Amino acid sequence: MDPRLFPKDFLWGASTASHQVEGGTVNQWSEWELAHATELARMSAKRMSWMPSWKTVRHDAQDPENYVSGRGVEHYKRYEEDFDLLEDLHMNSFRFSIEWSRIEPKEGAWNPEAIRHYHRYIKSLQKRGIEPILNIWHWTMPTWFTNKGGFEKKANIVYFEEFVRKLAEEYGPELRYIIVLNEPNVYTTYSYLVGDWPPQIKRPLLAFKVYRNLVRAHRRAYAVIKQVEPSVHVGTAMNMANNQSKRGRNPFSPIVAHLANYGWNRWFLNRTKKQTDFIGINYYNTNYYHGFSMHNPTTPVNDLGWYMEPEGILPVMVQTYAHYKKPIIITENGVADAKDRYRRWWIEQTLVAMQRALSQGVDVRGYMHWSLLDNFEWAQGWWPKFGLVAVDREHNMKRTIRPSAKWFATYLERLEAFQVAREKGTGSKPPKLAAKPVPTPEKTNLASPKPSEGNSSMLRRKPNTENMDRTAFMRRFNTNLKDRNGER
Ligand code: BGC
């Protein structure tokens, strides 16, 4: 694959969210954590002992402290240090969120110190030549807003609109990219359908109402930002899965995979496509449907037990672009991997997939890894480690760049050197991406997987050919397989 495909102004960066890293946030999530930490610890075995990593994570998962965001990783205080890390990682962009409960701790009362903080924060990125990408809403809200019913009530959207207006007025002139909402599909599902997250409600009709109100919230936010600062590019970050039907005789599998694509990946975007300048894709999962249930291979999985198929991001990018014809930014992508066994492989496969997408004409503009730092992983707490940079919360929040991140930084450094040399007309070799097989985890045997597991499922899976020329897809698909098996 040709690294020349990455344009020089491609956004290379990492993502975070206020509540997951800042520390000291007081919102509906922090209140919920304090009320539920003991119960979450007590129920952890029931919820998580199926995970292959359970033995390793059990100690932390059974500790109530694990479920309290508390001091976070002190990113609110240490952001300068963290932005130095971005420079060390050769990144040119950074996605972050602004904590609503800090800016407007009481209804209608703006907090000038918090407002100044984020001005300094944005300036500090810019001083380093790093593009700040603001994400307005990443699920946390001030309690005065959620006590009124939050997004359950259409009449409450006006409060969000005012917050957006404030941010647009304050920071709009300093920004080129704003994401309004992070993963409205995940929030609605876990807070109102599955009922695992605050406010822990399981009511499908209410979930639908909230989802529709988030559509309205996005549309209004778009209008407000454009009115205040027309030059800003505005988008939404959607969690998108690569939904596939498992090969076999079940006639429902392709229908269910299709419905999953529609409901999960498109429903929201279909309703907001006129109010979006780019589409943010958060990719973590490929799901195989067998009839009405999900049948994913059991290896390789990350620490959270999620099946990993990094190259599954390719069909997601291709289909999204075919559908909406809008520029794409990968706004999140990563693995929970405390031992850093998979991260490099995951990133490398993702880069190959992005090159393939670019070679097929998909307008991909950037890649933000999740996450820069180990972070508070919502109802799972602190034990899952998503950071390019490990944070030791026991030892003064010490930051350590993981080996995979060092590799990624070297790749980005070489890519930049190559691009600069090419512009000057001097020779320089482009950096290469090794097509590596799935790294073999301890105690699993991927060299000879069982017929229903691991790589072999790739042979049996029926590719989703929607919006794609079948021959082209199959050619690419076979190449993918060779890559995956290390044959190329
Ligand atoms: C969310 C992040 C989360 C990540 C890993 C995404 O769905 O936006 O907040 O940490 O997944 O679970």
Image (cartoon, grey):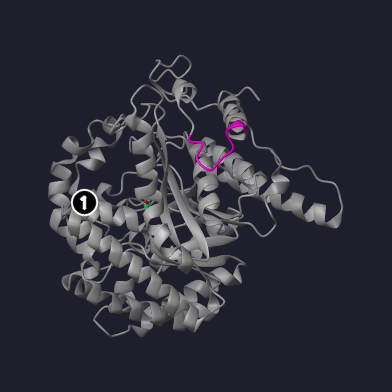
Extent of the magenta region: 464-471
In which quadrant of the rendered image does the C terminus lie?
top right
In which quadrant of the rendered image does the N terminus lie?
top right
Q: Is residue 314 magenta?
A: no
Kind of residue at badge 1: Leu
- Give whichever of 30, 392 is nearer the camera: 30
Residue 447 versus residue 2 in the image, above or below: above
Left/right placement of residue 35 relative to residue 5 reads: left
Task: Give the main secondary structure, helix, strand or loop, of the magenta stretch.
Answer: loop
- Give whichever of 121, 355 is nearer the camera: 355
Residue 233 at x, y = what percent? 54, 70
Residue visible at 54% across and 52% down?
A: 321
Viewer can see residue 198: no
Viewer can see residue 410: yes
Residue visible at 61% across and 39% down?
A: 352
Residue 202 at x, y = what percent? 16, 52
- Give whichever of 278, 307 is nearer the camera: 278
Instruction: Kindly indicate the quadrant of the structure image that contains residue 113.
Output: bottom left
Residue 205 at x, y = what percent? 18, 57
Pointer 1 residue: 193
Q: Does mark 1's beta carbon lie closer than 8 Å to ligand 1?
A: no
Residue 50 versus residue 402 in the image, above or below: above
